[in-house]
Image (cartoon, rainbow, N blue to C red):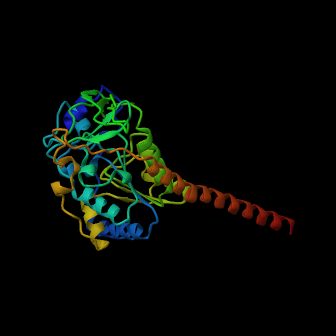
Amino acid sequence: MSCSYADGLSPYDDKGVLGAPEKFDDAEKLDTKCNLLAKQISEARHVVFHTGAGISTTAGIPDFRGPNGVWTLEKKGLKPNVNISFNDAVPTKTHMALKQLVDLGMVKYIVSQNIDGLHLRSGLKREFLSELHGNMFIEQCDTCEKQFIRHSATTSVGQKLLDKNCPRVKLTGRACRGKIRDTVLDWEANLPDLDLKLSELHSSVADLNICLGTTLQIVPSGNLPLNTLKYGGRMVIVNLQATKHDKKADMIINAYVDDVMVKVMKKLGLEIPEYTPEMDPSKTEGLHDGSKLIEWTIFKDDLNSAKKLHEIHCKNFKKRKLEMKDIKKKIKKEEVEE
């Protein structure tokens, strides 16, 4: 449960702004903004979504800083009324819409702060996803660093040992002999290197970063959407509360994330697929007894591809910017001489 996850974290006082008031766009304004967002997505070269706890609330998993969020209520000595187990929660319309957009090539990457595993369970492939704060349905070897999908959510938090040996067998036929840990980060733990690096690269390459259901308070994840602004891109925020970077956004949509994604998909002429256990890798037969093994490891090829994209789009942008600056200086100099 989300509460259990929060309870498992180390004590930490600075949890950011809690319980800020929610704002809602009226129906006409919402429709206009969703129409514009759909147009921007269809015209963009490289769209990246940044997802927070707000995309999972309709799955029954409470957020943290909303009016009824886990930490907002904790401050009052209360707990959320609705709190489904991670095992029983299923991907929302937003998760399924994002998976469909990725499958169609309209979205290139997703950066998630969520640990609930719902992106994985939607059928989204690892090559399109960075999980900055870990995943309850993923475990990792502390020796070979390979990651594996679990059939149920881990009950531990903070990258603790799970009393399991690494199931990987090397090409030599020998077992890895490493120990398995959960992947869920505790406060101030270092973010996973490859997930963070890919997030930084794709957020910079993107000409459209879209933030869903996050107040962008946690760093560095909350600052990643700003990367596109350095290279002439746009940033859109969809959230009910004010966020840390509202002043820098090109558009802010104040509405429930599912409502926005349903409208956007409709305007794009696309259906949102229904979640089914068959598409959920955590439901694969054999995971529960160890007879089946599914990796969830980032491949170096994915990192190399992202680096090439960054070199093409970002370095060239800087070069073009410097060239334009030199041209402007030359014109100004000529005007002065005349």
Kindly tell me whether residue 158 is visible in this rendering: no
As drawn, which residue projects farthest toward the right? 337
253 relative to 189, above or below: below
| Image spot of residue 64 (x, y percent) | 27, 40
Depth order, front residue of 249/195? 195
Q: Is residue 69 left or right of residue 196?
A: left
Kindly tell me whether residue 121 is visible in this rendering: yes
Report which quarter residue 2 is drawn in. Answer: top left
Report which quarter residue 159 is drawn in. Answer: top left
Depth order, front residue of 148/211? 148
265 relative to 131, above or below: below
| Image spot of residue 255 (x, y percent) | 28, 58
Q: Is residue 57 left or right of residue 106?
A: left
69 relative to 96, above or below: above
| Image spot of residue 186 (x, y percent) | 33, 31
Q: Is residue 219 left or right of residue 136?
A: right
316 relative to 294, above or below: below
Q: Quadrant of the C terminus?
A: bottom right
Q: How many marks?
A: 0
| Residue at 82%, 66% in the rendered image | 334
As drawn, which residue projects farthest toward the front? 172
Q: Is residue 280 left or right of residue 330?
A: left
